[in-house]
Amino acid sequence: MKIFFSTLFSIYLMQSQAQVADWSVKKYIDNSFEINSPQPLQCGIKTYTNDSTGFSNVIHNCVYQEDYTKDGRQYKGKIFMVTIMEYPNEPLYTDSIALILELMQESIPTRIGNYKTNIIYQSENNYLSAPGVSYRLNYNEGKSTLKARMIWYKNKLFTVQCFSSVERALDTGIDKFIESFRILE
């Protein structure tokens, strides 16, 4: 019996290590950031302009969706995503940075809108000297989870996030993805 469980555990470890072996550090958006991901992220760009104010910002989205097979059926798995919102180049003062951090903290429940959500944790998580916040929340009536980190750096808001089912929320790949994020500019 011990041999059977030892064999199963060995197979599990080999599969886990094989999955980890596919991960590599990749650079994106004119080398503005790098991140360790299982596959290359697909990136796109959009520009939004507020007609009443003339204020416009550029949004970069980089996404990779990891599907999986269970019982012969294909399922949508984790979604790894980095979003960068560029704002006009204007100087920020110390009180503005505190306001941005407060805005990030307050925007977490707002970002997920009308979904039935439960915030699991939310904490300040600065990146070097840049203000930041990390959080995890469950949504979709507790069936799905979002784990993310937001960082305000210069005139950009970086959001690194991973969506998954609650059952897959403790997957080490999620933390590996989020924690490997590095700003290069």
Image (cartoon, rainbow, N blue to C red):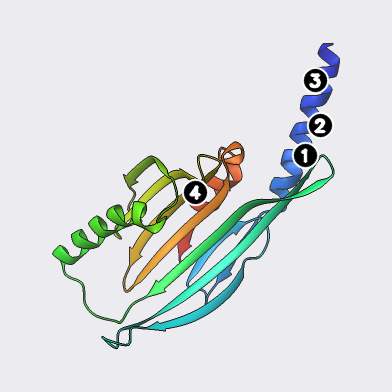
- State the CA–CA distance, disc 2 to disc 1: 6 Å
Q: Could you say which disc has been placed on residue 25 in the image?
A: none
- Label 3, on which residue? 6
Query: Which comes sooner in the sequence, label 2 or label 3?
Result: 3
Quadrant where the N terminus is found in the figure: top right
The amino acid type, in three-letter code, at marker 1 is: Gln
- The residue lying furthest to the left in this view is 95
Give the SS element for disc 3. Answer: helix
Residue 116 percent coordinates (x, y): 44, 46
Task: Name the amino acid, label 2.
Answer: Ile
The nearer-to-camera label among 1 and 4 is 4
Closest to the observer, 176 or 85: 85
Q: CA distance from mark 3 to mark 4?
A: 34 Å
Dot 3 or dot 4: first in sequence order is 3
Q: Residue at x 30, y 60 (%)?
A: 130
Identify the mark at residue 146; answer none if there is no mark. Answer: 4
Disc marking residue 15: 1
Cβ–Cβ below 8 Å for labels 1 and 4?
A: no
Residue 165: percent from left, percent from top: 59, 43
Instruction: Estimate how packed mark 4 is, as few (under 14), some (14 to 19) or many (20 or more) residues with alpha carbons within 10 Å.
Output: many
Looking at the rendered image, the disc whose residue lies closer to the viewer, 3 or 4, is: 4
The spot of residue 104 in percent (x, y) is: 30, 57
SS at circle 1: helix
Q: Which residue corresponds to mark 2?
A: 11
Mark sitting earlier along the chain (2/4): 2
Against 146, is 92 above or below?
below
Q: Quadrant of residue 117?
A: top left
Q: Gap in Å between the C-alphas at discs 1 and 4? A: 25 Å
Which of 148 and 175 lies nearest the eye of the viewer? 148
Q: Is residue 174 visible?
A: yes
